[in-house]
Amino acid sequence: MTPGSFAVILVHLVVAVLVTPLLIGVMRTVRARLEGRVGAGVWQPWRDLIKLLAKEPTRAPGSTPVLTLAPIVLMASSLVLCALIPLVSTVALASVPGDLFVVVSVLLVGTVSLALLGLESGTAFGGMGSSRHMVIAAMVEPTVLLSVYALSVPAGTSDLAAIVQARVADPISLLNPVSLLAIFALVVVVIAETGRLPVDNPSTHLELTMVHEAMILESGGRDLGWLELGSWLRLTALLGLVANLAVPWGVAPDAAPLSLLVGVGAVFAKLVVLGAVLAAAEVFIAKLRLFRVPELLAGSFVLAFLSVSASYLVF
């Protein structure tokens, strides 16, 4: 690992950890203001996270190590995801490249660990949330692969950093049908993967509607803090990927300090804008019925498939 790539990894992780609670705070504040409420403020997620990490977790007698390890695995996989995705810079790692298939595999590790946590609780709600979570994941992962693969055809590689660089070098490709279809499909699956409306409602605990919340009902204290931060980091990483694929300007092409500083400012602005737009859209839409969610995800898969098919006709 070169000093440049090590610096890029460090910047990615620091930016992700510092920006993520602020991003969640901005999204909650935007939604509160549009609903006519004051809201808790953009710094409330930071305060909640500090409070949770300072508390000892309470675990039921007879629980297996899954209850302890699942939050750590989710947090670790989320950090690896942030390190691999070109958030600030496109400098690739020599030993572990940010390949599309590697990123999807890391994403799946966190998904499975969260599902095992829900099953470990032994409650009806936990099992229900885990089953719904895995059904959604089974439909999301192929769409992620296809949509990013369509964008990789012009670049001739599945490395995410190289794809972003190729899109910067060819701005015309940002507006062709292949790019638009793939980005739209990717936005839908990011919403589903991160448990946002209309697939899941992150601000509810209604038994018949919750997915993510059902799997973490039995967690508390430090465990819940890791789960919340890990889930938020996945949202940051995936939103950052969508933002840099749709608007690739500002991403640092090297590890120079000035370039990294510009990249940090660019990704911060993109995440805040995209998060605010997502939160504003959630105010005007309702949660889909559970049996309508596969229809939405199947539609995104069709769009991704069409983008792959069109990529071989256009390029």
Image (spheres, rainbow, N blue to C red):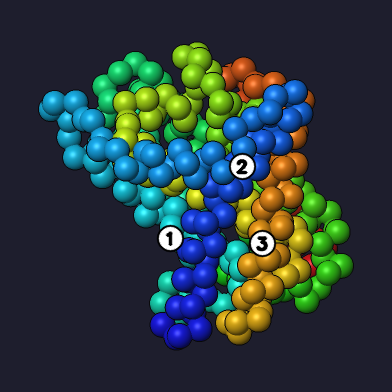
| Residue type pointed to by label 1 | Val
Of the image marks 1 and 2, the number of the one nearer the N terminus:
2
Residue in the image at 75% along x and 41% along y: 277
298 vs 6, left or right, is: right
| Residue type pointed to by label 3 | Val
Picture quarter containing residue 264?
Answer: bottom right
Q: Secondary structure at mark 1?
A: helix
Q: Secondary structure at mark 2?
A: loop
Q: Which residue is mark 1?
A: 80
| Residue 186 in picture, x, y percent from top left | 66, 47
Q: Nearer the viewer, mark 1 or mark 2?
A: 2
Q: Which residue is mark 3?
A: 267
* Location of the N terminus (image quadrant): bottom left
Residue in the image at 52% along x and 40% along y: 45
User: Distance from label 3 to label 1 (Cα)?
Assistant: 18 Å
User: Distance from label 1 to label 2 (Cα)?
Assistant: 26 Å
Residues 307 and 241: in front is 241
Residue in the image at 43% along x and 42% along y: 49
